[in-house]
Amino acid sequence: MEIPLPRPVPVPFILHESSSQFDWKGSGSLSLKTFRNGKTLYEAGRGHFAVNNENYLLLNEGQEYSLHIDSSTPVESFCIFFPPGYVEEIGRNLISSDLQLLDEPYRYSSASKMEWVERTYAMDNRLGAALKHLRNLYSQDTLDSWAITEQLHQLAVHMLDLHRNVQQEINELDMIRLSTREELYRRVYIGHEYISAYYDQPLTLEQTASAAQLSVNHFLRNYKKLFGTSPHRYLTECRLLAAKRLLLDSDRSVTNICYDVGFESLGSFSSLFTRRFHSSPSQLRAKR
């Protein structure tokens, strides 16, 4: 007895490489970007993104972007590229009735393209955990094609959950028109990502608001609404966390670390660091 098979459905492509120096520019499909052992800088559309061990980047199909790696040690990349309609088809299966799926079990269409908010997401959410799990298994070369397909299917399910969560965040903004809420959310996030990417540079508020294409007052007001804190406090937190990592993982002097992460005053840095971590930079260094 012959079992009718569905026509082949395009499958995601996995890119797993390591490089200490790399530059690339072009466009691609809907994708998830992860990196270990270093940082990669992306420019996509109006956004600037820093991707490292602690986050991943989501980019839309057709988005032009460039990436830059400049590290003293190899940076491991693990990126997944989804063919058109792949995630949307899994979404259709999740919301369709059993009767519909019985009548059209092999239907596949790339017509209803989803738009995603291009930004970085913390690795500590469900999609990030699934990405780390797949990356570890893939690195060990313990998965056959069947197992990889199942893992990628689950990734897509988590992506759809993430999409719904972001839409909920957008809907919580107090603008009447949905298009206004979506655009403001994207612009404020562009400013947020700009801080994350360039916290170690001498940033100004005006420069950051300009990157988001917002006035300073508009950016400040809506940043606080979205993140519950001010851009300056977030900038300071980025610098303090970076300083803590360097104090624990490198032999650079406290003074060099202070200036390397973007602080302009050693005294101010020491005071802020002690208040944040209940230990001075020198005391933390001595404990490692």
Image (cartoon, helix red, strand yellow):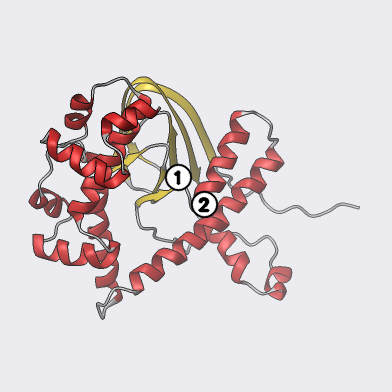
Instruction: Give the residue type at disc 1.
Output: Leu
The answer to whether residue 56 is left or right of residue 269 is right
Pointer 2 residue: 127
The answer to whether residue 275 is left or right of residue 167 is left
Q: In the rendering, at what x and y percent does residue 108 appear?
A: 60, 59
Could one spot residue 83 in this view of the protein? no
Mark 2 / mark 1, whichever is N-terminal: 1
Q: Looking at this view, is 136 or 124 the one in front?
A: 124
Question: For the residue labelled by badge 1, is the local secondary structure a helix, a strand or a loop?
Answer: strand
- Count of marks overlaid on the render: 2
Looking at the figure, which quarter contains the C terminus? Answer: top left
Q: Would you identify the image quadrant in which residue 67 lies?
A: top left
Tell me which residue sits at (55%, 54%) in the image: 156
Q: Which mark is residue 166?
A: none
Pointer 1 residue: 32
Could one spot residue 184 in this view of the protein? yes
Tell me which residue sits at (61%, 53%) in the image: 154
Tell me which residue sits at (86%, 52%) in the image: 2
Q: In the rendering, at what x and y percent does residue 236 appear?
A: 21, 46
Q: Looking at this view, is 116 or 272 the one in front?
A: 272
Instruction: Give the residue type at disc 2.
Output: Leu
Label 2 or label 1, whichever lies nearer to me, is 2
